[in-house]
């Protein structure tokens, strides 16, 4: 549980540093016999800072719970 919590904290920090995920979408525009015309569009998936903060808080809570449970 501690490792997963640390992973969540790192992912949350990455979301705050890089607020988007770039990807390329391919779309077939025209197909005539063996000839195909394909377009490639570069797009970004935007991530709200709220998700980064919630992910960091959840990961920190998991790490804290693991430390408290381990001390008992």
Image (cartoon, grey):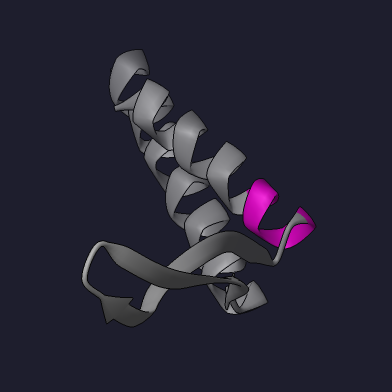
Which image quarter holds the N terminus? Answer: top left
Residue extending furthest toward the left: 33
Q: Is residue 39 left or right of residue 18?
A: left
Residue 69 vertical placement versus 31 (above, below): above
Q: Position of residue 53 (x, y in %)?
A: 60, 65
Q: Nearer the viewer, residue 66 or 17?
A: 17
Which image quarter holds the C terminus? Answer: top left
Residue 8 vertical placement versus 19 (above, below): above
Residue 58 vertical placement versus 9 (above, below): below
* Residues in magenta, as a range: 13-17
Tell me which residue sits at (47%, 32%) in the image: 7
Q: Position of residue 42 (x, y in %)?
A: 63, 69
Residue 9 belongs to the span the image colors magenta: no
Q: Nearer the viewer, residue 57 or 18?
A: 18
Tell me which residue sits at (60%, 38%) in the image: 10
Q: Main secondary structure of the magenta part?
A: helix
């Amino acid at each position: 549980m501690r490792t997963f919590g640390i992973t969540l904290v790192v992912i949350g920090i990455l979301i705050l540093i890089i607020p988007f995920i770039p990807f390329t979408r391919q779309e077939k525009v025209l197909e005539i016999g063996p000839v195909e015309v394909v377009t490639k569009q570069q797009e970004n998936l935007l991530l709200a800072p709220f998700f980064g903060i919630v992910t960091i808080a959840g990961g920190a809570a998991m790490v804290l719970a693991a430390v408290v449970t381990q001390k008992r």
